[in-house]
Image: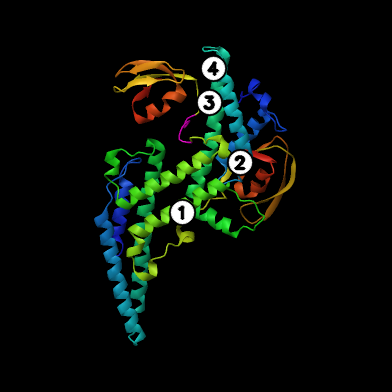
């Protein structure tokens, strides 16, 4: 009662490590909303009684109202922080989410994600004016130290054609010396590993 | 990133400034944006010029011989400039999304002739982002709340930049009589900023000086 369930939601999210997303706790949210409904009804009843002349009920009303506001704030914080993590994943994984993460999302969050994607893509395309062709901001995440980097394949990826037309076979455990700009997205997908 | 310079790609530059100057300005804008707690006015022209430049250089290089040492050095240069640009825009986007309520409110209060902090595209994205967030909140929780709590009071819960945070800055032009309110009971104190000196100050005090290039954040 009085906001405990809502705090439990926040705790649950807080306990999960950064960069991961626990399953959407629909049941928890439903319980908090139910609690809010009950509190609100009690308040309504007490307010009506006070209007009719019953004394001493006002502090209770205030307490319940504070609990209501706290519940609201906690629910919003829960939603907002999940959204923030989801947003971070857009930058990390690109526009397609891995299935295990998608599994933990609610229907509405998936919708949010696709709308965010669309807006972001439209923005990135618009950079540099209509003729500029845009700039992919999700590339070049780290300052470039050298033009070529050494990478190791972590899985079989098949053939890969570089910008100048050479075709490489990316086999598991093979090592290559590639232009950083060309293999950055493969590194983020986990196909290649940057060897220092 | 201190030895950046682009020499040969610069001949198709038609603006009054040279490519090297433009680059220096981009870098300054980037650093200012990076270290300032709030969103600074956008430098869209600069970004456009720089992107043009990049595309030009890219073409020059594709004509060069394969394995030419000069070409790969230029390629490196392009990568670095692109990083600066992407990072600059990325930082702005992060701030826009974080302070979206605050910024849109500010935007609504602006007069007709006051330029916006955001470029039209950024503004569009900010609006989309805010609307999108509100839809999410509404659909999942707000819709089911008792009737007096259904509204999302953005200004109450949204984050706004902390203008009292401290920033490092370097003085580019002599500025006299900057009012700094000291902690405690001595009231305000006026100080002179000597050219070339470096300070740590509260952002609020120096915010106007950043916009007219008198100081840069470092």
User: What is the span of residues highlighted in magenta in the rendered image?
Assistant: A137-142
Mark 2 sits on what residue?
Answer: B44
* Badge 3 or badge 4: first in the primary sequence: 4
Whether residue A51 can be seen here: yes
For residue A105, above or below residue B173 = below
Would you say the residues marked 1 and 2 are in contact, meaning their CB atoms lie under 8 Å apart? no
- The chain letter under disc 1 is B
Asked which quadrant contains residue B142, the reply is: bottom left
Which residue of the protein is positioned furthest toward the bottom in this rendering? A53
- Disc assigned to residue B72: 4
Q: Position of residue A13 (x, y in %)?
A: 32, 48
Q: Secondary structure at mark 1?
A: helix
Looking at this view, is B81 or B112 the one in front?
B112
Residue A14 forms part of the magenta stretch: no
- Disc assigned to residue A122: none
Tally the marks.
Answer: 4
Would you say the residues marked 3 and 4 are in contact, meaning their CB atoms lie under 8 Å apart? no
The Cα atoms of the two marked residues, 2 and 3, are separated by 20 Å
* Badge 3 or badge 1: first in the primary sequence: 3
Q: Residue at x 48, y 36 (%)?
A: A137
Mark 3 sits on what residue?
Answer: B79
């Amino acid at each position: 009662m009085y906001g405990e369930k809502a705090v439990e939601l926040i705790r649950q999210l807080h306990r999960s490590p950064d960069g991961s997303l626990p399953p959407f706790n629909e049941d928890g949210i439903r319980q908090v909303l139910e609690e809010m409904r009950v509190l609100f009804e009690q308040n309504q009843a007490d307010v009506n009684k006070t209007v009719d002349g019953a004394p001493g009920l006002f502090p209770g009303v205030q307490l319940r109202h504070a609990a209501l506001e706290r519940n609201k704030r906690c629910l919003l914080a829960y939603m907002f922080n999940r959204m923030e993590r989801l947003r971070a994943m857009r930058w990390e994984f690109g526009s397609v989410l891995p299935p295990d993460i998608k599994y933990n999302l609610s229907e509405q969050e998936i919708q949010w994600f696709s709308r965010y994607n669309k807006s972001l893509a439209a923005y990135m395309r618009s950079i540099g004016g209509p003729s500029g062709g845009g700039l992919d901001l999700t590339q070049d995440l780290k300052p470039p130290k050298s033009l070529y980097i050494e990478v190791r394949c972590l899985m079989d990826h098949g053939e890969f054609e570089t910008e100048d037309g050479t075709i490489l076979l990316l086999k598991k455990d093979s090592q290559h010396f590639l232009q950083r700009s060309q293999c950055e997205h493969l590194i983020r997908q986990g196909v290649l590993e940057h060897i220092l | 990133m201190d030895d950046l310079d682009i020499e040969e790609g610069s001949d198709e530059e038609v603006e009054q400034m040279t490519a090297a100057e433009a680059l220096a300005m981009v870098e300054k804008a980037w650093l200012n944006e990076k270290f300032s707690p709030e969103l600074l006015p956008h430098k869209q022209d600069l970004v456009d010029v720089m992107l043009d430049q990049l595309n030009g250089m890219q073409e020059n290089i594709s004509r060069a011989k394969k394995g030419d040492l000069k070409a790969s050095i230029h390629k490196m240069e392009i990568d670095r400039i692109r990083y600066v640009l992407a990072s600059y825009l990325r930082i702005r986007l992060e701030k826009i999304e974080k302070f979206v309520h605050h910024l849109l409110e500010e935007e609504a209060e602006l007069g007709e002739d006051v330029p916006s902090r955001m470029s039209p595209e950024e503004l569009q994205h900010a609006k989309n982002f805010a609307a999108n967030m509100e839809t999410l909140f509404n659909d999942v929780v707000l819709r089911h709340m008792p009737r007096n709590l259904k509204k999302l009071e953005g200004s109450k819960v949204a984050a706004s930049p902390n203008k009292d945070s401290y920033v490092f800055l370097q003085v580019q032009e002599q500025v006299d009589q900057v009012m700094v309110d000291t902690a405690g009971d001595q009231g305000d104190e006026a100080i002179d900023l000597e050219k070339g000196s470096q300070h740590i100050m509260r952002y609020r005090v120096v915010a106007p000086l950043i916009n007219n290039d008198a100081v840069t954040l470092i």
